[in-house]
Image (cartoon, grey):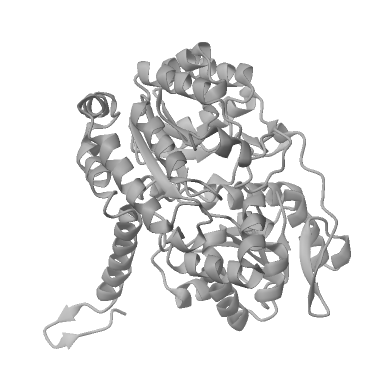
């Protein structure tokens, strides 16, 4: 029987923690297809140190170790891969997730302990890796990976995407502590119920935004409404989940499917609240879908506007219809669905006037809340290629590495407006957005959990001065947890410190 250990690295500067859905999907598929034994080590909710992790993984004695990571977790992956190689020198290591997809060749070049980097969705790739480990397949026959040959990175041919998502098994919920994810900051800060979990019900996005990863490709594939409702029912009855986060890139792309899911939730009479922290495509939202969202219990939805400049919309290939987007926000706000807007400031060539136009759009909209971010050119995206062409490959990698350790995007800006000017505009945008009595009243009225009012108000007020408030506070909390666990391991006694047996 094959054994696989999945490790999700800790992310020191991110406030939101979602369940390791990718590892859970791969685990479920591997168990169904090969009866493999799988363990998931999610370091985002563990306070154990490296030695504890190494002991647990070594005791499990896996055939493969897989890291599922975002690009910003690159330093942690590199550190952990080196650490695990010293403890388990004969165990192959694979890096996957968005990081593996976006920087496959770079991973092989820069992380000597990484034997493979997995590109795209990994269910079938994992099956071939296990076959390779068992000696039944040569490395060059594994689709969708980068590997090392004579010290250089070689990318194998890509594999076809999985067309029928209904054929995939339910996630391996038994391999994680489902209730534990209700006790940490979740992807959507606005929530109603404590007991929650997250779901992906589709893969792929047909839009061509130049700042976005292509983890699942450009072909939109989706689970049927019946399949989604079946897994929701499992979570509702088995684990008592009462709030669900749909993390799809564009849940409402197929409006009939979206309506069928919402209708199914209503017909089953579930006491369920729903959030869309990743967002929906707001310029294709219509009144009927908005009505069903309200009936089904949607309490919060994010919408990604990015820029209110038509020129920028064209340049970044998002091509959002701004008038339709404004109308879609109104539809949600009128139904008292808490609506959060994402905006990106500092696109290549962006002028001061265009930045102010974006801030004005947010301020004049019916959004309840908004976040204004510096543009981040993620490796593996067309925007990053543009960034690299301007500053050079070596400089681009150096600046991204700096960002990974301290997420200040000011060194990554290619805007016409200088970085200090962008920071001033962002600060003013926050102040003017929230200094609206009507908006303040709607926030209080429509916030699904009134207990959150104080914390959310704090972040809204301080973000202009302290852009990374959530990140920093989360980092301090995590450090305190580790310190507290360390102190508990050496409690005080009458004779001083003594080690707990």
- The residue at the far bottom in this view is 495
Q: How many marks?
A: 0
Furthest-left residue in this view: 494
Q: Residue 153 placed where, x, y %?
A: 78, 71
Image coordinates for residue 490, horizontal then vertical, percent: 25, 79
Q: Residue at x 70, y 38 (%)?
A: 168
The residue positioned 59% from the left and 66% from the top of the image is 396
Decide: is 449 above or below 33.
above
Looking at the image, residue 257 lies above or below residue 72: above
Q: Position of residue 223 (x, y in %)?
A: 66, 30
Tell me: 143 left or right of 83. right
Q: Out of 486 and 189, give the one closest to the viewer.
A: 189
Q: Is residue 63 visible?
A: no
* Residue 377 appears left or right of 430: right
Residue located 53% across and 48% down the image: 347
- Spot occupied by residue 432 in the image (x, y as percentages of width and height): 27, 37
- Residue 156: quadrant of the picture: bottom right
- Asked if one can make out residue 434 in the rendered structure from this viewpoint, the answer is yes
482 vs 381: above or below: below
Quadrant of the image for the N terminus?
Answer: bottom right
Would you say 271 lies left or right of 432 here? right
Q: Is residue 250 left or right of residue 119?
A: left
Q: Which part of the image, by quadrant, shows the C terminus?
A: bottom left
Q: Nearer the viewer, residue 328 or 23?
A: 328
- The residue positioned 25% from the left and 38% from the top of the image is 452
Nearer-the-camera pick, 43 or 100: 100
């Amino acid at each position: 029987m094959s054994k696989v250990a999945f490790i999700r690295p800790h992310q020191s500067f991110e406030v939101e923690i979602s369940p390791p859905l990718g590892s859970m999907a791969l685990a479920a598929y591997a168990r169904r297809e090969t009866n493999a034994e799988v363990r998931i080590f999610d370091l985002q909710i563990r306070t154990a140190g490296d030695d504890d992790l190494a002991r647990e993984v070594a005791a499990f004695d896996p055939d493969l170790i897989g890291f599922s990571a975002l690009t910003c977790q690159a330093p942690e992956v590199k550190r952990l891969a080196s650490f695990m190689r010293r403890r388990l020198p004969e165990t192959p290591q694979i890096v996957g997730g968005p990081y593996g997809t976006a920087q496959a060749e770079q991973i092989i070049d820069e992380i000597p302990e990484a034997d493979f980097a997995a590109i795209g969705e990994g269910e079938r790739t994992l099956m071939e890796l296990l076959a390779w480990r068992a000696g039944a397949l040569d490395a060059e026959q594994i689709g969708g990976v980068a590997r090392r040959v004579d010290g250089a990175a070689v990318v194998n041919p890509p594999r076809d995407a999985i067309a029928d998502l209904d054929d995939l098994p339910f996630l391996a919920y038994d391999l994680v502590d489902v209730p534990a994810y209700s006790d940490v900051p979740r992807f959507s800060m606005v929530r109603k119920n404590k007991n929650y979990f997250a779901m992906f019900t589709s893969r792929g996005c047909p839009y061509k935004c130049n700042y976005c990863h292509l983890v699942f490709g450009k072909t939109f594939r989706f689970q049927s409404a019946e399949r989604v409702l079946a897994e929701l029912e499992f979570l509702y009855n088995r684990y008592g989940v009462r709030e669900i986060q749909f993390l799809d890139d564009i849940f409402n792309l197929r409006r009939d499917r979206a309506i069928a899911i919402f209708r199914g939730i209503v017909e089953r009479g579930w006491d369920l609240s729903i959030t869309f922290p990743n967002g929906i495509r707001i310029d294709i939202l219509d009144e009927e879908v908005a009505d069903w969202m309200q009936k089904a219990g949607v309490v919060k939805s994010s919408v990604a506007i990015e820029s209110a400049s038509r020129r920028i919309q064209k340049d970044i290939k998002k091509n959002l219809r701004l008038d339709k987007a404004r109308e879609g926000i109104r539809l949600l706000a009128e139904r008292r669905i808490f609506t959060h807007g994402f905006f990106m400031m500092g696109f290549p060539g962006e002028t001061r006037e265009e930045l102010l136009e974006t801030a004005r759009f947010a301020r004049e909209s019916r959004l309840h809340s908004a976040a204004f971010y510096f543009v981040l050119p993620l490796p593996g995206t067309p925007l990053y290629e543009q960034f690299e062409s301007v500053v050079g490959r070596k400089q681009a990698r150096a600046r991204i590495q700096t960002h990974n350790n301290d997420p200040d995007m000011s060194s990554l800006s290619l805007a016409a407006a200088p970085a200090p000017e962008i920071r001033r505009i962002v600060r003013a945008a926050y102040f003017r957005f929230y200094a609206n009595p009507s908006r303040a009243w709607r926030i209080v009225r429509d916030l699904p959990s009134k207990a959150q009012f104080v914390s959310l108000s704090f972040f809204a007020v301080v973000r202009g001065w302290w852009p990374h408030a959530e990140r920093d506070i989360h980092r301090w909390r995590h450090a305190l947890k580790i310190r507290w666990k360390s102190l508990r391991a050496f409690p005080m006694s009458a004779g001083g410190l003594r080690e707990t047996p």
